[in-house]
Image (tube, rainbow, N blue to C red):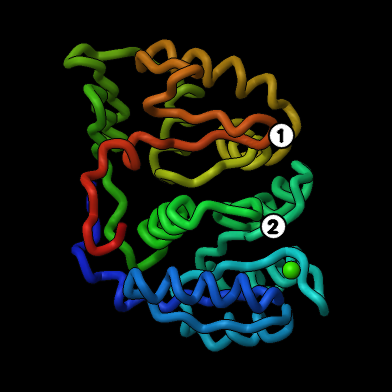
Amino acid sequence: MSAAAPGDSARHVIAVVEDDAALRRALRTSLRARGFDVREVATGEEGVVLAADAVADAFLLDLGLPDIDGLDVLARIREFSAVPIIVLTARDRQADKVRALDAGADDYVTKPFDTEELLARLRAALRRAPGGPPARTVVQCDGVEIDLARRLVTVGGEAVHLTRTELGLLEALVTNPGKLLTHQELLRRVWGQGYGTESEYLRVYVAQLRRKLGDAASSPRFILTEPGIGYRWIADELAAPPQPGLA
Ligand code: CA
């Protein structure tokens, strides 16, 4: 695990695009208390301009904005920027979350959200961002070793045979630690561009992967199911030591 050194977050600028002044203030307070610099705007147009300035290392983007819809802001930013974006939404409609993730959001939190959870997701998104630590080719967690370059997986020191599809799925998850990958994203990545709605394939293959890794859907150590949305690789999060400067 390539944990950032305490104090590293001081370099990070977080952009907050949110029209609710009280929530902006609460976010500003929490983020500054963790050593982040904060830039805030209240409209979608200003959010797009802020992204174009390329000063922020990550965005917290409200979906319900007064001028343009947050999903449109997301789409416009994605035309020119790969900056990590976590969507804040009061909407509990599954479809909005999936649309945001498929449109390029890195993650989402539903209001009212737990600040610690938001910060954990923000740190995960920053770790994955370009310029972050290089991607590992060997992942070790909780008795499982995954050598992505050699396509070897061992569990408790014993080699485990995975099919090509299982390996593809595992690679997609492991190389995006902490990131919620939608059904569509996983299907397109592993099965190909023509796929996207065959969630039942994922259910079958994720179940096989879990069985081979010794994981369980009911008490996941590696793969977390986000019902109706997708899957998330959580092993790094669980194995990571506490980060006093960031937590
Ligand atoms: Ca709003």
Q: Is residue 219 above or below residue 54?
A: above
Badge 2 density bin: few <14, some 14–19, many ≥20, Cα 10 Å: many
- Contact, CB < 8 Å: mark 1 with mark 2? no
Residue nearest the observer in this picture, 198 or 152 = 198
Q: Which residue is mark 2?
A: 89
Picture quadrant where residue 132 is located? bottom left
Q: Which residue is mark 1?
A: 195
Q: Please give the name of the residue rendered at 69% of the width and 26% of the height, measured from the top-left corner.
A: 199
Rounded to the nearest whole Å, what is the CA distance between mark 1 and mark 2?
28 Å
Tell me the amino acid under the disc marked 2. Thr
Is the residue at mark 2 in contact range of ligand 1, meaning its CB lies under 8 Å from it? Answer: no
- Crowding around mark 1 (Cα neighbors within 10 Å: few <14, some 14 to 19, many 20+) is some
Residue at 59 percent of width and 85 percent of height: 50
Q: Quadrant of the C terminus?
A: bottom left
Question: On the rendered structure, is 204 left or right of 135?
Answer: right
Query: Mark 1 or 2, which is nearer the eye?
Result: 2
Provide residue 63's location: percent of width, then percent of height. Answer: 73, 64
Question: In the rendered image, which quarter is residue 78 located in?
Answer: bottom right
Q: Quadrant of residue 4?
A: bottom left
Q: Nearer the viewer, residue 89 or 104?
A: 89
In this rendering, the answer to whether 71 lies above or below 29 is above
State how many labels appear: 2
Which residue shows up at 70% across the image and 54% down it? 100
Measured as percent of width and height from the top left, residue 90 is found at 72, 56
> Residue at point 71% right, 67% down?
75
Q: Earlier in the sequence, mark 1 or mark 2?
A: 2
| Quarter of the displayed picture in which ligand 1 can be seen | bottom right
Q: Nearer the viewer, residue 33 or 129?
A: 33
Q: Secondary structure at mark 1?
A: loop
**Residue 127 seen by the camera:** yes
Q: Is residue 205 above or below residue 241?
A: above
Amino acid identity at mark 1: Tyr
